[in-house]
Image (cartoon, helix red, strand yellow):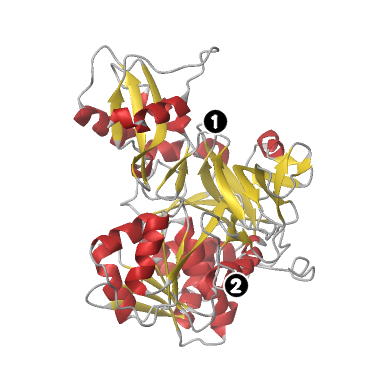
Amino acid sequence: MTDTALKSPFNLAKHVLQAGMATPDKTALSLLSAEHSEDWSYATLTAAVRGTASGLIATGLVPGDIVLMRLGNTPDFPVAYLGALAAGLVPVPTAAALTEAEVAKMLPDLRPSAVLHDPQVPCPAHPHRIGLDALRAMRALPPADWHLGDPHRLGYIIYTSGTSGVPTAVMHAHRAILARKMMFQGWYDLCAEDRLLHAGAFNWTYTLGTGLMDPWTLGATALIPAPGTPAAELPALLARHRATIFAAAPGVYRQVLKNADQLALPDLRHGLSAGEKLNPAVRAAWNFATGTAIYEAFGMSECSTFISGCPDHPAKPGALGRAQPGRKVAIISGDGPAPQGHPGTIAVHQSDPGLMLGYLNAPEQTAERYQGDWFLTGDQGVMDAEGQITYLGRSDDMMNAGGFRVSPLEVEAALATLPGVTAVGVTEVEIKPGVSVIAAFYTAPAPLDDTVLHRYAGETLARYKQPRLFIHLAELPTGANGKLLRRKLREEFEAPSHV
């Protein structure tokens, strides 16, 4: 990353659409269904983004204002996201699955100047709500000028589950998009001629980055299946639309492989996986079925992905891969970097342009994540002489639900208010090789009806945070200081005697 790029006036949205402006008639986005595709050219996409920027400014918003996004899984999401950035606003993309109560918890800290709202998506009341029809009408407005400024200024905010159990707002600069170039060869092997199909929803950050922003930055074509597309239909879409790269969460690969042992995908070069650990058996089955490899990446909300395997340098069996070219990654143990072969905490140097600005309104929490010049991820690993990093687990109890990090404290707090429950402990458990789910262990005078438990979880938690298993215990395991031992819950559940 050149110093010039980080000092010149800059706008993230302009950077993403710049290459496509040279090929205005080329397809930027295809929304795919079994019957047809909805195609957006680069000219159409750019006009929609800049028109949306004009419309948002016309509502009285000014650069620096925070805009909460409560939009569904449609192209409206990336258009509004880039439109806000083009205007110098600070968009906050959120998952449509969040409940109204979960979104309400964000508002006191976030204090958004406006909410972009699809009426089908749960959202608390707000005095400046901009509806979906109004957003769509903005696309026809004259284009706004790009709001240019310091690349280090606040660009957007995303939420991650904090270890305290309260969702944490992560602030990113406009410059964060520049760090994603390191993935183009360090993970994707992406070029302008590629047609990248991402199986995730528009409003998931993995899709927003890997599936849309990155191919658009190079002038490539993004392919997104229509909402509700079954996994069984993905191979046909990949073949029919000549996808060259396929990106998905590990669970999607598992579902696709349930339906076929052999897949004819002559244009596909390889697959990409992120969000959670990919089971080696799934990787091998995909290779057998398609003749292509899956390259996996490791990252987090605070820095996106920064360790990966790629066609030029595949990850060794059992390893995550290497730091992407241009990244400075270390294993920290004690007061500094650990010797090769010694375990420690995976860390990213503070000079990385993709690293967050910090947590919103939480300077102390931000400072706790640093040791000298290193940002500590909380994930444990070990690095070999070739720079390959093997993942050794979390140093806390954070869970992974389909690519979303979830704090057990947040789930426990929600379930503790259920009448009849006297105590609850939540952890991630493996139910079969390579498949883990969130499980809630609770105490109560008598076992509660599973239907009641699942209904209550559905009313208080987003779908991806809801436990799939509820297990009644006489008591929860605790240490000498009375602290809940979640690891013991997991170990006892996964013990052979439990089966």
State the quadrant of the N terminus: bottom right
Counting other residues with Cα less than 10 Å from the Cα at mark 2, is it few (<14), some (14-19), or many (20 or more)? Answer: some
Residue at 75%, 36% in the rendered image = 334
Q: Would residue 58 be seen by someone viewing this image from the given angle?
A: no
Q: Quadrant of residue 401?
A: top left
Q: Which residue is mark 2?
A: 185
Q: Amino acid at mark 1?
A: Ser
Residue depicted at x 29% and y 37%: 458
Mark 1 vs mark 2, CA separation in Å: 36 Å
Give the camera-side residue of 284 and 241.
Answer: 284
Instruction: Look at the numbered disc 1 and give the secondary structure of its residue.
Output: loop
The residue depicted at 61 percent of the width and 54 percent of the height is 389
Percent position of residue 10, x then y = 69, 68
Which of disc 2 and disc 1 is earlier in sequence?
Answer: 1
Q: Tell me if residue 356 comes above or below residue 87 in the rendering.
A: above
Residue kind at label 2, given as amino acid type: Gln
Q: 429 and 212: which one is in front?
A: 429
Query: What SS does tag 2 mark?
Result: helix
Residue 164: mark: 1
- In the displayed structure, would residue 182 be above or below residue 337? below
Q: Residue 334's mark?
A: none
Instruction: Specify whether 63 is left or right of 200.
Output: right
Given residues 127 and 357, the one toward you in this image is 357
Quadrant for the C terminus, please.
top left
